[in-house]
Image (cartoon, helix red, strand yellow):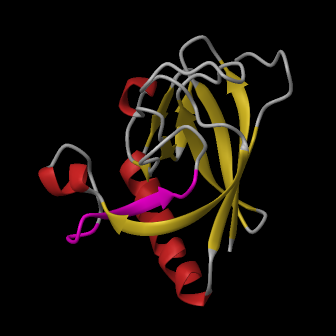
Amino acid sequence: MNLRLERKWLTKESTEGELAIDGARECFTLEDVVRPAGVKIPGETAIPPGRYQVILTLSERAKLGTLWSPRADHMLPLLLNVPGFDGIRIHAGNRASDTEGCIIVGHERAENLVSGSRVALVALMAKLEVGLAEGPVHITVVDAPAGVLA
């Protein structure tokens, strides 16, 4: 299974995009701001473009109740080997302030906002579980063309 996150709308507050699974559009995404290479503000910077393996692991934040998981075992998708970042997950939320570098999913989007996030995460997790049972899952993150603003 291959996921592709295309960053399409950049603002001064967030990065919005679309996520596809094996070429079929799945949902919208919301991330922190994309910054120039080498510039990172902890908890306020989108991950670098690239290809990353995705696994499901226990989220300590979900276990503590500070992050929502649709599963009773508190599992959430985790991206592996993201340069300069640790603990990058795909999870529910609504605004860039909810991301801390992670990828938020949603069914609807407005500038600097996604909604229907929990519903989108439930659907995505069901597909990831099937994909992971069949083999490795990867996500490719692609930046928007230069100069694109919402």
In the image, residue 80 sits, relative to residue 131, either above or below, namely above
Q: Quadrant of residue 2?
A: bottom right
Query: Which residues, given as a range, are shown in magenta?
Result: 71-81
- The x, y position of residue 66, in whole percent, is 19, 43
Furthest-bottom residue in this view: 134
Name the residue: 45% across, 45% down. 86
User: Is 137 a magenta residue?
Assistant: no
Name the residue: 49% across, 68% down. 55
Q: Nearer the viewer, residue 22 or 102?
A: 102
User: Is 76 a magenta residue?
Assistant: yes
In the image, residue 43 sits, relative to residue 74, either above or below, namely above
- The x, y position of residue 135, in whole percent, is 62, 85
The quarter of the rendered structure image containing the C terminus is top right
Left or right: 63, with 111 as reference point: left
- The x, y position of residue 115, in whole percent, is 44, 38
Left or right: 5, with 67 as reference point: right
